[in-house]
Image: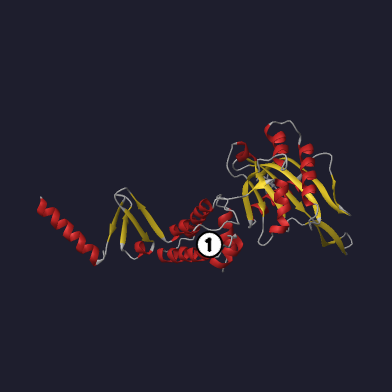
Amino acid sequence: MADGRGEAAEAPEVVLENEIVNVIVHSLNRVDGGFIVDDRKKVLDIGVTVQRLIDQLAKIYAGKTGKSHGRFEDDVDNYPVAKFLEAYYKTGASDFVTTTFQMAETLKKSAQGTASTGGHVFFAHFKRVADQTHYLIVAILNDELGAALNKSKEVVDALHLDIKGFRLAGRVNLTSWADGADKYLSFIKGRGQDKVSEFFKLFLGCNNSVAAVVETQKLGTALEAFAQSKEMTEEQREDFLRNAYTVCKRYADKDTPFELEAFANELWPDNPEELSSSFEGSGLNISDGFIPDKRSLRSLVKFSGGTKNWRIIFDRAALSNDEIEFNVESETLVIKKLPEELLARLRVEVSQDGEED
């Protein structure tokens, strides 16, 4: 018989974003003359706190702007991280503790002579539940002094990991790497942080040389997708893409590398994070640091195409002001408002064809 209190509510089912395979932390401590590695001898137990930490780390990394993308260097003797990971992930010849210690020692060598202060180096191998993709994240986290209340309600100092503030991190898409993809490795470059992040890039052995044409084409795709997601009118879309063209053309003219944060601040100043998040979530892995390709930029304001017998090129504005009409079903273009000179020549041509018949 009901007692009026109702049935106890069931505990909500916890849906994991990431399935942790292995996680460990080694510390890179600065001492006189360089660094030493204070290593952990076994992997961390995966409890609620560790799960939350890795989920936060993965989410924050994915949303970070200023990342460079690339692949491992072929020279595994001077850039051995790829060799260590191959023994762990591809062949199973090495365990996670050994692999991450080798990587920490490599990081120590790369950090020598830099201004790095070191920190706690987290290594996490996890599988994203949504698509079963395996990743390895390496991130240097530092302690941050905060405040907490003790049992007596007194405010006391409390050290905690600065999860949101990390500046040095890299991620390997292990699944893509094993499948032979062209780009699967990224690291946080950060605006104006080349000198700071260079040793981390060298540690990873990341070859981030990019083809400007390919990156510019991906940039155009991301901009088109963003305009569509905002449900812009044709006029708004035209203005948006033309402004993007103007900004990128200036980068190209001045040999200024593309950087997402600066680009978003200029192109979408009212909410730059919205544009940045759209790019980061696109899956296109657009790298910072490339000089936009001028020819490829034309797609933002022009359409072009042709066969061996004809070629056409026109501004996007021609579609919006009804000079050119595209019929999706018949896959045809109707060109209106032809210039008088061209009309006159066409009339003569048609007239001459008629006389010959």
In the rendered view, tell whether residue 81 sits above or below residue 266: above
The one nearer the camera, 309 or 152, is 309
Is residue 338 toward the left or the right of residue 36 in the image? left
The one nearer the camera, 327 or 196, is 196
Total residue callouts: 1
| Residue drawn 20% across the image and 64% down it | 344
Measured as percent of width and height from the top left, residue 319 is found at 35, 61
Q: Residue farthest to the bottom? A: 270
| Residue drawn 46% across the image and 65% down it | 242
Is residue 197 toward the left or the right of residue 243 in the image? right
Whether residue 60 is visible to the viewer of this picture, yes or no, is yes
In the rendered view, tell whether residue 170 sits above or below residue 159: above
Whether residue 15 is visible to the viewer of this picture, yes or no, is no
| Residue drawn 49% across the image and 56% down it | 220
Q: Quadrant of the N terminus?
A: top right
Please say which color scheme the image uses: secondary structure
Measured as percent of width and height from the top left, residue 60 is found at 67, 54
Q: Describe the element under mark 1 as helix, strand or loop.
A: helix
Which amino acid type corresponds to the residue marked 1 in the rendered image?
Ala
Residue bearing the label numbered 1: 252
Q: Quadrant of residue 263?
A: bottom right
Measured as percent of width and height from the top left, residue 181 is found at 58, 40
Is residue 15 toward the left or the right of residue 306 in the image? right
Measured as percent of width and height from the top left, residue 209 is found at 60, 50
Binning the other alpha carbons within 10 Å of mark 1 as few (below 14), some (14 to 19) or many (20 upward) gives some
The one nearer the camera, 320 or 111, is 111
